[in-house]
Image (tube, grey):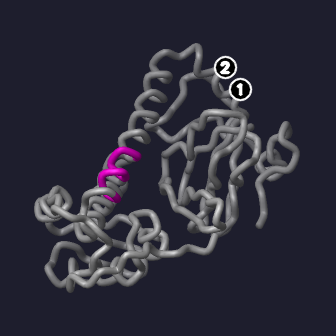
Amino acid sequence: MNRLYGHANEPPAGLRSNGADRTLPAPLELDCSVPWSRRKLAPRQHIFHQGDEQTHVYVVKSGFVRLYSLLSNGRCQVIGFKSPDEFVAFEYGAKHRFSAQAVTATEMRSVPTAVFFAAASGDPQFLLKLYNVACEDLSRAHDLVLTIAKRDAEGSIAAFMLEVDARAAARSAKGDFVSLPMLRGDIGNYLGLTNETVSRIFTHFKKLRLIEVRGRYGIRLLDRRALRSISEHIPSDRKSMDLENRWLPRPATVLC
């Protein structure tokens, strides 16, 4: 798998050759002049791997990115997705604790970490934005714990759809349809469900006119109130269960 950079202290050669972009997407715009470099990635190309040195700050300009960890038993655990105008991650420590991989054709912006924080330190308003970004990531982590621990399968999928829809609205995405380009297996792995359960629930929601699906990736929420009600229902005993109440205890397995 291709990496964006080799030596830990060198910026990605591809980023250097593609020139610099000194602006961030509007929601994350930094008043200071920062040399944001750009890079286009093919599907499944990595931005960085688990264990790599942290050298750059990354923002998704277009496309989608999945975050995943390799567990000690060799299995892959999807821990999140990043969409346009979002930072890929802020991590503690010198090395990345997970991998970041393009789901679709993706365009990134990057800047060396030291340059980024040196510029940001002189802009209190932008530091507040970074704080809000960190809080949003923490809130998603808390919600994922609730999803895996308490929500049933339908509630988990409904909550996931509402989150993706809200994130699209926050970046003022045009149109009624939002994109879900990740594999059903990735969604199931992220939520602790099987591929079959995810597919059944998507089909069931379509029959109930809760969602409309267009093409391979497009989805529109037709009844947010009903989906929110489903997402807020906490059953007495949550397991990975399909719509016919047959137990499916093993979450989806994803090949990294």
Q: Is residue 23 magenta?
A: no
Q: Does residue 88 lie above or below 33 as drawn?
A: below
Q: Give how far across and how far down residue 111 sits, in percent.
A: 69, 36
Q: Residue at x 40, y 66 (%)?
A: 192
Secondary element at tag 2: helix
Secondary element at tag 1: helix
Quadrant of the image containing the N terminus: bottom right
Q: Nearer the viewer, residue 126 or 1?
A: 1
On the picture, is 235 further left or further right than 22?
A: left
Q: Give how far across and how far down residue 82 sits, in percent.
A: 50, 53
What residue type is disc 1 on? Answer: Val
Q: Give how far across and how far down residue 191 sits, in percent.
A: 39, 64
Q: Residue at x 29, y 67 (%)?
A: 157
**Few, some or many residues within 10 Å of mark 1 (<14, 14–19, 20+):** some
Q: Does residue 91 lie above or below 162 as drawn?
A: above
Q: Does residue 121 lie above or below 78 as drawn?
A: above
What residue type is disc 2 on? Answer: Ala
Chief secondary structure of the magenta portion: helix
Question: Which residue corresponds to mark 2?
Answer: 118
Question: Which residue corresponds to mark 1?
Answer: 115
Whether tag 1 and tag 2 are in contact, CB under 8 A, the answer is yes
**Few, some or many residues within 10 Å of mark 2 (<14, 14–19, 20+):** few
Q: Give how far across and how far down residue 88 sits, in percent.
A: 56, 46
Q: Residue at x 88, y 45 (%)?
A: 7
* Residue range highlighted in magenta: 141-148
